[in-house]
């Protein structure tokens, strides 16, 4: 019986809705909303209207405000419509609202409030967990970024190393040097270096002995030069007759001294090729015990004792660094030092 009453009420409501369908305000509002355009909207072309973000933002704000007002008006009119329908309709067609229904609705509201409270509490817990875990998550994210960058860098290094290895394999085909052959080569080089060290030591000892001999010979040469100066002085003071018997011994002594000096300095021949040029030929022994010839031509400025240039003719290569030594001695006009330096370099080759 109750179901038939509810069905009859529903049919009555349908008939009433169909009869008043064209006059309902909500239907008219749909048409008005579709054709509505705000009065303060600027009339601009469509291609320019959506170009400026500020204009778009103002348009959106105005539309949101208008929709809120429209929603409020709709709710207000809907409530008024329901209230009017409830008053003018037959009371028998509508079920009465009792205190029991209000209590049930209040209980449902309380349950919904409790669920809302629980949901808010859970949301608050989620927010708290997010705030608590955010720093650690950020640290982990930074570490992951660093690890990713490091992995990318190592991957690039691996690729570069493989490319370099491929180039080396192409540059050095088989058979390649192994550890055993490298060790054998190293042992041979060590033995060779030891032999060279021994030879260097022998050469250094021989150089020291030669330097000592040169030092002794230089002292003897200085003594002979002193004796020669004294003899020349005596020869100028004493007038020697053609049949003087003292001339022959002095001549023999001078030639012997000159030969001794030449033997010390390895001087084989000395020639005056011109008025301002003196050619000296030496036969020298190097550190290896081999003999070679060298010619030194001293060129002086005309009518002076100033050394102008030096020409060296050698059967072996002495070295380009002699040019600096020659220039230094020419600038100081040190003939003895120049010859000593040239002979020392020639013997040390």
Image (spheres, grey):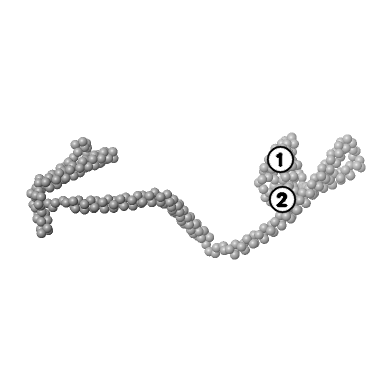
Q: Residue at x 47, y 55 (%)?
A: 154
Snapshot quadrant of residue 67 = top left
Q: Residue at x 86, y 45 (%)?
A: 253
Viewed as shown, does residue 258 lie left or right of 298?
right
Identify the secondary structure beneath mark 1. helix
Residue 115 seen from this side: yes
Q: Which residue is mark 2?
A: 348
Identify the secondary structure beneath mark 2. helix
- Quarter holding the N terminus is bottom left
Question: Toward the viewer: 62 or 343?
Answer: 62
Residue 145 seen from this side: no
Q: Earlier in the sequence, mark 2 or mark 1?
A: 1
Q: Which mark is residue 242?
A: none
Question: Toward the viewer: 125 or 42?
Answer: 125
Question: Toward the viewer: 64 or 127?
Answer: 127
| Percent x, y of residue 41 | 21, 37
Q: Residue at x 40, y 50 (%)?
A: 132
Q: Which mark is residue 329?
A: 1
| Percent x, y of residue 7 | 11, 56
Marks 2 & 1, CB-CB < 8 Å contact:
no
Viewed as shown, does residue 107 lie left or right of 347?
left
Q: Residues within 10 Å of mark 1 (few under 14, many from 20)?
A: some
Q: Residue furthest front?
A: 99
Viewed as shown, does residue 177 lie left or right of 203?
left
Q: Residue at x 73, y 50 (%)?
A: 347
| Percent x, y of residue 115 | 28, 53
| Percent x, y of residue 258 | 82, 45
């Amino acid at each position: 019986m109750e179901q038939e009453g509810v069905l009859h009420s529903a049919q009555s409501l349908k008939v009433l809705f169909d009869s008043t369908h064209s006059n309902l305000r909500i239907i008219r509002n749909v048409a008005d909303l579709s054709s509505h355009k705000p009065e303060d909207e600027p009339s601009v072309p469509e291609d320019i209207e959506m170009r400026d973000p500020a204009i778009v933002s103002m348009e959106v704000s105005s539309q949101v405000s208008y929709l809120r007002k429209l929603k409020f008006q709709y709710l207000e009119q809907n409530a008024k419509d329901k209230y009017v329908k409830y008053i003018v309709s037959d009371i028998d067609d509508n079920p009465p609202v009792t205190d029991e229904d209000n209590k049930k609705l209040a209980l449902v509201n309380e349950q919904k409030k409790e669920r809302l409270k629980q949901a808010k509490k859970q949301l608050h817990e989620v927010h708290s967990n997010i705030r608590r875990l955010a720093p650690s998550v950020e640290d982990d994210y930074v570490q992951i970024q660093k690890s990713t960058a490091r992995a990318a860098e190592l991957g690039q290094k691996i690729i570069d190393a493989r490319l370099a290895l491929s180039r080396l394999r192409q540059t050095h085909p088989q058979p390649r040097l192994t550890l055993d052959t490298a060790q054998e080569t190293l042992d041979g080089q060590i033995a060779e270096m030891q032999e060279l060290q021994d030879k260097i030591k022998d050469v250094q000892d021989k150089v020291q002995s030669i330097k000592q001999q040169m030092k002794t010979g230089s002292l003897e040469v200085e003594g002979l030069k002193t004796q020669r100066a004294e003899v020349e002085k005596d020869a100028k003071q004493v007038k020697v007759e053609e049949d003087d018997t003292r001339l022959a011994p002095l001549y023999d002594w001078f030639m012997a001294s000159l030969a001794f000096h030449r033997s010390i300095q390895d001087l084989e021949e000395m020639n005056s090729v011109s008025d301002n040029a003196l050619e000296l030929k030496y036969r020298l022994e190097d550190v290896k015990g081999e003999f070679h010839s060298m010619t030194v031509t001293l060129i002086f400025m005309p009518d002076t004792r100033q050394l102008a240039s030096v020409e060296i003719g050698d059967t072996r290569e002495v070295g380009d660094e002699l040019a600096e030594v020659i220039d230094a001695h020419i600038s100081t006009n040190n003939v003895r030092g120049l010859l000593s330096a040239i002979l020392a370099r020639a013997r040390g080759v």
